[in-house]
Image (tube, grey):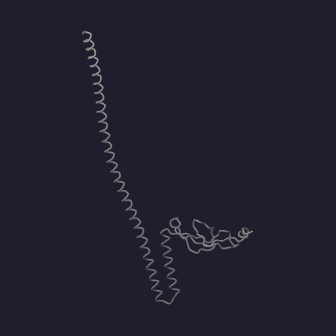
Amino acid sequence: MELDLLTKKKTKTKTSRIALKESAKIQELEATIQQLEDNLSLEKEKVKEYLTSLKYMQADFENYRKRSEKETQEAVSRSNEKLLSCLIGVLDDFENAILAGETTENKEALLEGVSMVHKNLEKLLTQEGLVRLECVGQAFNPNLHEILTQVPTNEHQNGIVLEEARKGFLFKGKVLRPSVVKVACNTLEGDKKNE
């Protein structure tokens, strides 16, 4: 019986130690869980801050984009307004030339008036950045010219522009309209190809 009591006491002590160890582990786990929950709360707060910051940045960007579009439209409108105000003067000159043509028999005076209007219009367009392409006598350039026809000749080198059927223009260095041209085609080369 004493042996049983001693065994029971040892078992009870062992059980108590195990219970104490488990209790300590539980407390340690609870402390870890509490620390993780605290960390999670801090991270959730950071996420809220980042999301709010991102929303403000997105709103700022949208406002910037709208403001930029509005400023661009206003700049284009001002440029168009400036050009149109200059063209109104040319329109007035054309109307005066038409009136003069209706009342005068002097064709030379009318031609001179229309020529002056033409010069004023060319001057205005040049001031705005329009440049006429000069191509007669130059080598054909597919970036600046379109071929209307090839003219067989031995008097000019192959590929030289002989005549301009429609004038071409550059606007601030960019081709606005290519020249339509007639280009020399040597008949000697054409004869060699046929042989």
Q: Quadrant of residue 46?
A: top left
Q: Quadrant of residue 182?
A: bottom right
The single residue placed furthest to the right in the displayed view is 195
* Percent of width and height locating residue 21: 29, 22
* Percent of width and height locating residue 137: 63, 71
In the displayed structure, would residue 42 be above or below residue 27? below
Instruction: Give the residue displayed 28% in from the left and 19% down from the top.
Output: 15
Instruction: Give the residue displayed 61% in from the left and 72% down from the top.
Output: 136
91 and 158: which one is in front? Answer: 158
In the displayed structure, would residue 70 be above or below residue 114? above
94 and 127: which one is in front? Answer: 94
The single residue placed furthest to the bottom in the displayed view is 105
185 and 37: which one is in front? Answer: 37
* Percent of width and height locating residue 22: 29, 24
- Quarter placement of the N terminus: top left
Q: Quadrant of residue 165?
A: bottom right
Q: How many marks?
A: 0
Instruction: Give the residue displayed 36% in from the left and 56% down from the top.
Output: 62
- Is 60 on the left-hand or right-hand side of 156? left
Instruction: Give the residue displayed 48% in from the left and 75% down from the top.
Output: 121
- Is 193 on the left-hand or right-hand side of 114? right
36 and 9: which one is in front? Answer: 9
* Percent of width and height locating residue 88: 42, 76
- Quarter placement of the C terminus: bottom right
The single residue placed furthest to the top in the displayed view is 2
